[in-house]
Image (tube, helix red, strand yellow):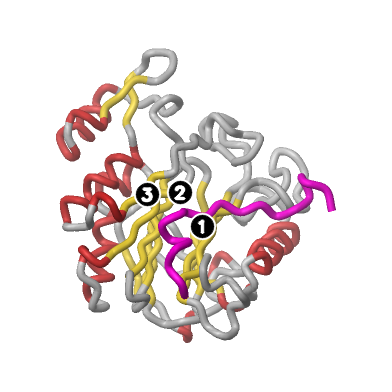
Amino acid sequence: MSERERVELWRAPNLAELGGVVHAFSTRLGGVSPSPFASLNLGYRTGDEAARVTENRRRFVEALGARLDQVICAEQVHGAGVARVDARDRGRGAEDPGSSVPGVDALATSEAGCLLLLCFADCVPVFLADRRRRAVALAHAGWRGSLAGVAEAAAAEMGRLGVDPGELVVAVGPCIKPCCYEVSPELAQRFADRFGDEVVRRTRWGAPSVDLAEANRRALEALGVPKASIYIEPECTACRTDLYFSHRAEGGATGRMAAVIGLGAGDVGGCGSG
């Protein structure tokens, strides 16, 4: 199998150190979809053929040593809703987007063997795990979700599962960065008011921009998550369309990556260390 045919996965160094936590973020490599979804498109609502998306999801999950029927997906409506899920929810949205957990952009679980999966193409994937491996959560934070506090909501749900913010290990996966994320002056001001002036930046061409990853980091640190426990991937999805799908850089005609996290169990292969 050639380099471009293999399923390639991103993993966060801080989560990789936690035994018993399975996590990954996909790239666009290793799937069966044609252009403009080439090739590991994991999003059903893109215009790609559903059978190809299902095969791509199967490849992605099997690369983790898991099965597609362990996956639990959320509807993703660009809000701050969170749902707690367990083994009874396994399979929701995995092969049928209509069965996804409705109305939420974050999922949390304390049950081993459940794989939380959300799709992305520039928005911020926020992975949350407990140092003592009692629970995990995953959030989808676009600009709306970031302002609405979806990352904080996911952390709060972890709190209801018995996890103090000081015990959280957080990773922000590949997403669009300020170099490429142009916004209106009005939206930039809303972010400055919510997260501080430092999150307002400029694009490579000098337009107003915001740092979505930094905004979510600040929100979680304000809750009590130690700064040293938060990792932010520096790579920009819009700069690296050879490796990632980018809704902004590719004009909306593109595929979706996926983030996944779960607590390891005997039926989740050998991925305990991520």
Residue at image location 36% in from the left, 62% down from the top: 128
Identify the disc placed on residue 173.
2
The quarter of the displayed image where residue 71 is located: bottom right
Could you say where residue 134 lies in the image, as x and y percent from the top left? 34, 78
- What amino acid is at disc 2? Gly
Horizontal side, residue 183 vs residue 6: left or right: left
Horizontal side, residue 112 vs residue 257: left or right: left
Q: Which stretch appears magenta?
A: 1-20
Q: Is the C-beta separation of discs 3 and 1 under 8 Å?
A: no
Query: Could you tell me which secondary element the residue under label 3 belongs to?
Result: strand
Which mark's residue is nearer the viewer, 3 or 2?
3
**Mark before the other along the chain sequence, 3 or 1:** 3
Residue at image location 28% in from the left, 70% down from the top: 158
Could you say where residue 129 lies in the image, as x and y percent from the top left? 36, 66
**Mark before the other along the chain sequence, 3 or 2:** 2
Which residue in the structure is indicated by mark 1?
259
Residue at image location 22% in from the left, 57% down from the top: 225
**Mark before the other along the chain sequence, 1 or 2:** 2
Q: Check disc 2: other Cα within 10 Å, few if <14, some if 14-19, many if 20+.
A: many
Q: Is the C-beta separation of discs 1 and 2 under 8 Å?
A: yes
Up-down: is 208 above or below 24? above
Query: Could you tell me which secondary element the residue under label 2 belongs to?
Result: loop
> Disc 3 and disc 2: Cα gap in Å?
8 Å
- What amino acid is at disc 1? Ala
Horizontal side, residue 243 vs residue 180: left or right: right
Residue at image location 32% in from the left, 44% down from the top: 144
Identify the disc placed on residue 231.
3
